[in-house]
Image (cartoon, rainbow, N blue to C red):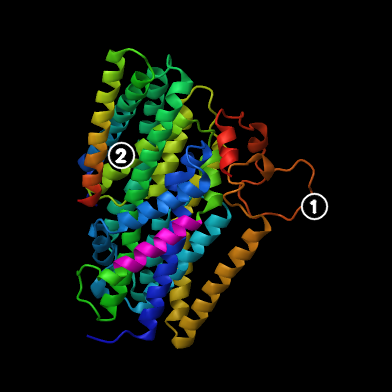
């Protein structure tokens, strides 16, 4: 048993920071459609998701174990510096994609960071290539299509079954269905993603010799990770919520319900069989699918294309940042310090840039304001979709429950 | 490289069937409760009960 060194302490704090970014990056997964259809007021939605993420984190520790012993070889000599650099890479990528409003996968950022850092530090024998393909890459490609197809068929079914019903009488039911299915996604997210951080912290403790390899995360780790993720979720990544809830396609309550149900069942079915899915990929696939399933709905393929592109580069990009950070961090104490300072600079910079054109719970549902008609001199916002002509072309028709949304704001 | 196609196929199949089934049932429930006849309402409640059971099973899977 060794004592908690300063370095391990820094790694733990960094892991919690990553967990926090993971929380606000992924709020959109559970709540984007619930917010955009007005089923819940934005603040209420993120608060509910935060609580359920917190609860979900306590439900199981299965995923945490696959991180510490799954894709990275614990015995290959991975040092705390390496884990630190991996986390910095993941955090940086999460912040950049959040600024751009891109729903990229937090899990892929973390895996990419870990893989890149391990490759630089100990070489290819430190990672399990087979596990990466089977547990990460294949599910990443397949899951959005499965969830999309399920959401599309379910959307058709629900519009067909409900075609003769009075919309006034069914709206309450769809609202309840949306809230329930979004709650399930939140819970599943807490269970899978908070555990990834727990796994990383446990890995750091293992490398520092403080806990035995292959042990369960200690209780304080579970508590800290669950709280960091809950806080991040409550803060809400409004930019990404806007992309998922409004920009991919215009979502009506039955579609929101169908999409979230498809996402929840896909996530549950696959995690039950041991695939570590990205919640983000599943939900984005389901939202796109539901846009295809309703007659008259428009899917904005330009937005989909940019989103998929960000998925493709997430793993290598986070890996590249982490690899570089590892190289610097392994130079000694000053290297670790430098990586930490650069990471902090990126955090501060992202926040400052985001303040130029803040997106929060008050304007998350307004996409027409993104392209003001006569403001050529406005500060350029770092938003991947700001200049999208498709967004001006299809301003959504006012929805019947718009008044409730406004009242709630 | 050993790709477990059968596990992938079963995940896909279960997801598709469960989603369409649940959404269909829930919609039946909503439509049933929106009507006045007693028979329609009873069907609606039955559909909701099956959905609730499915959600309970989902919770059991999350915790498992």
Secondary structure state at the residue bearing disc 2: helix
Residue neighbourhood size for the residue with mark 1, other residues' Cα within 10 Å, grouped as few (<14), some (14–19), many (≥20): few
Label number found at residue A265:
2
Looking at the image, can residue A34 be seen?
yes
Secondary structure state at the residue bearing disc 1: loop
Residue A396, by quadrant, is top right
A224 to A296, vertically: above or below = below
Residue A119 screen position, x and y as percent: 37, 69
Residue neighbourhood size for the residue with mark 2, other residues' Cα within 10 Å, grouped as few (<14), some (14–19), many (≥20): many
How many labels were placed on the picture?
A: 2
Q: Quadrant of the C terminus of chain A?
A: top right
For the residues labelled 1 and 2, the Cα–Cα distance comes to: 47 Å
Q: Residue at x 46, y 46 (%)?
A: A45
Residue A46 screen position, x and y as percent: 46, 50
- Magenta span covers which residues? A222-235
**Contact check, label 1 and label 2, Cβ < 8 Å:** no
Residue B41 screen position, x and y as percent: 30, 18
A136 to A201, vertically: above or below = above
Of labels 1 and 2, earlier in sequence is 2
Residue A5 screen position, x and y as percent: 34, 85
Label number found at residue A377:
1
Q: Is residue A1 magenta?
A: no
Please, what is the dominant secondary structure of the magenta stretch? helix
Q: Residue at x 47, y 31 (%)?
A: A253
- In this rendering, which labeled residue sits more in front, label 1 or label 2? 2
């Amino acid at each position: 048993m060794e004592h908690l060194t300063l370095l391990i302490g820094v790694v733990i704090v960094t892991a919690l920071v990553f967990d926090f970014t993971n929380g606000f990056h992924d709020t959109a997964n559970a709540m984007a459609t619930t917010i955009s259809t007005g089923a819940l007021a934005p603040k209420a939605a993120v608060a509910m998701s935060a609580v359920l993420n917190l609860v979900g984190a306590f439900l199981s520790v299965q995923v945490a174990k696959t991180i510490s012993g799954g894709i990275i070889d614990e015995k290959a000599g991975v040092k705390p510096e390496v884990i630190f650099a991996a986390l910095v890479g993941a955090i940086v990528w999460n912040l950049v994609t959040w600024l751009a409003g891109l729903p990229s996968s937090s899990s892929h950022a973390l895996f990419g960071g870990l893989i890149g850092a391990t490759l630089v530090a100990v070489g290819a024998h430190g990672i399990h290539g087979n596990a990466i393909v089977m547990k990460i890459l294949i599910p990443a490609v397949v899951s959005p299509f499965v969830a999309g197809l399920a959401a599309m068929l379910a959307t058709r079914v629900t519009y067909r079954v409900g075609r003769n019903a009075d919309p006034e009488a069914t709206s309450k039911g769809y609202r309840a269905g949306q809230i329930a299915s979004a709650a399930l996604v939140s819970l599943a997210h807490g269970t899978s993603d908070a555990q990834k951080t727990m796994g990383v912290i446990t890995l750091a403790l293992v490398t520092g010799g403080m806990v035995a390899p292959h042990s369960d995360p200690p209780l304080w780790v579970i508590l800290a990770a669950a709280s960091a993720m809950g806080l991040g979720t409550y803060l809400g990544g409004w930019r990404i919520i806007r992309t998922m809830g409004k920009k991919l396609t215009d979502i009506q309550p039955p579609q929101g319900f169908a999409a979230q149900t498809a996402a929840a069942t896909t996530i549950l079915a696959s995690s039950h069989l041991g695939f570590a899915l990205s919640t983000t990929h599943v939900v984005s696939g389901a939202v796109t699918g539901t846009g295809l399933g309703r007659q008259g709905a428009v899917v904005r393929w330009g937005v989909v294309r940019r989103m998929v592109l960000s998925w493709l580069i997430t793993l290598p990009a986070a890996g590249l940042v982490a690899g570089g950070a590892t190289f610097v961090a392994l130079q000694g104490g000053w290297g670790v310090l430098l990586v930490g300072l650069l990471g902090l600079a990126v955090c501060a910079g992202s926040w400052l840039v985001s303040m130029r054109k803040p997106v929060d719970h008050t304007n998350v549902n307004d996409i027409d304001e993104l392209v003001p008609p006569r403001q050529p001199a406005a500060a350029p916002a770092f938003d991947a979709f700001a200049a999208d002509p498709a967004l001006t072309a299809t301003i959504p028709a006012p929805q019947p429950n718009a008044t409730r949304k406004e009242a709630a704001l | 490289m050993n790709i477990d196609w059968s596990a992938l196929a079963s995940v896909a199949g279960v997801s598709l069937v469960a989603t369409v089934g649940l959404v269909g049932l829930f919609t039946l429930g909503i439509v049933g409760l929106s009507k006045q006849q007693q028979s329609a309402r009873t069907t609606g409640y039955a559909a909701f009960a099956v959905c609730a059971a499915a959600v309970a099973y989902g919770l059991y899977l999350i915790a498992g």
